[in-house]
Amino acid sequence: MDPWPPKRAHGRALEAAKQPVADGPHLRSRQSVGFGETLLREMPMLLVPKDATAFLRSAAPDVLLQAAARLGDSQRLASFVAFQHLPAEQQEALLAMGVPEGSCSIRETERVIRTFLQDFPVFAAAVDWKLFVEVVGIVSERGSRLANGNYAVYKLMDLASHSCQPNAVVETLDEDGLRELRCLSYAGIAENEEISTSYVAEEVLLQPSEPRRATIRAERGGWHCACNRCKLDGEVANDLRSVSAQLRRGMEVPPLRERLQALKAIDTALPFAMAAKARVRFSLAQACEAAVDQGLFEEAKMLYEQALDETDIVLGQKGLRNLANIKRRLEQLLETMA
């Protein structure tokens, strides 16, 4: 099992005066930030080991072990025990996070515990069940699974609201859970602007409104997204569907100059789709490079450079490989142009 308690924050910390600030259950930028710039680096405030049962055996009193055996849900109880191990100040910070508007997690946890106590009333005094429901609801909604299987909650980063058109992206930098929050908006993030990320994968964001919202409900336990993009309808929504479809097809429509114009429309409507757009730019740059007779080397160079920026924003291991491919193609093109 992973060591307990978890390691405390480390790494390349930003100056406190430059970090985003909590605004109730939201996160706001303390200063203006440009595209691709780092807003925050943070270690988990709360960490629930992936082997919840083993963790409970090592860290929980016997009465909770008995409750876990009858409840059949070690994960919820492990979240609560991990919360109890936090210093009082961090417990208060976690409780202040609350759950996102429209969340069903607290109501669902209340239902589970109410049924459990009806079946096993002997455990009614074993735990502060009201606090348990609140903690588990917050951890379930705000937290996320790390690559090593541990479940983590971040004091500031997890306050970022969900948006289907986010202005920031989160990347996990190492196995200890160090994460970085970067600006994803081409226009940057203004001072005091609310910071938003996506709770779902980029592929989901590329879907039209109805299937996208249905996927979010399914993945987030019935949660209804009410972001500005989801409120769009009529002509604007149709435009988004059109450019989303273009992006998924890789814009395989001639001629090249029309495809370059179409990419500008995609940038406007889908500024957040970094990985998908980087792939499109890379393919389009190769096409421009191959079309020697059309004199599009400068356009190819620009596309490779933009693809580098976008891939760098949403890095990860796959991104590192993609980054190397794009750099190699750009270097080859520059040699040709020299």
Image (tube, rainbow, N blue to C red):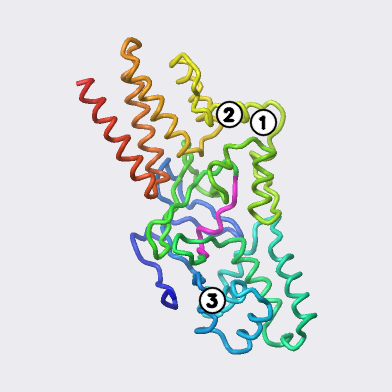
Three-letter residue code for mark 3 = Ala
Mark earlier in primary sequence (1, 2)? 1
Q: In front here: 19 or 230?
A: 230
Left of 96 or right of it: where is 3? left
The residue that mark 2 highlights is: 245
Task: Look at the image and say whether residue 88 sits in the magenta stretch.
Answer: no
Q: Residues within 10 Å of mark 1 (few under 14, many from 20)?
A: some
The residue that mark 3 highlights is: 82
Element class at badge 2: helix
Label of residue 117 in the image: none
Q: Residue 41 falls in which quadrant of the image? A: bottom left
Three-letter residue code for mark 2 = Ala
Three-letter residue code for mark 1 = Ala
The residue that mark 1 highlights is: 237
Mark earlier in primary sequence (3, 1)? 3
Q: In front here: 120 or 297?
A: 120
Q: Quadrant of the C terminus?
A: top left
Is 87 placed above or below 272 here? Answer: below
Q: CA distance from mark 1 to mark 2?
A: 12 Å
Is 52 placed above or below 286 here? Answer: below
Q: CA distance from mark 2 to mark 3?
A: 44 Å
- Which segment did they paint magenta? 153-163
Which residue does the image show at 73% across and 65% down from the upper left? 108
Is 18 placed above or below 252 here? Answer: below
Which residue does the image show at 64% across and 73% down from the upper left? 73
Which residue does the image show at 37% across and 38% down from the upper left? 309
The spot of residue 301 in percent (x, y) is 32, 25
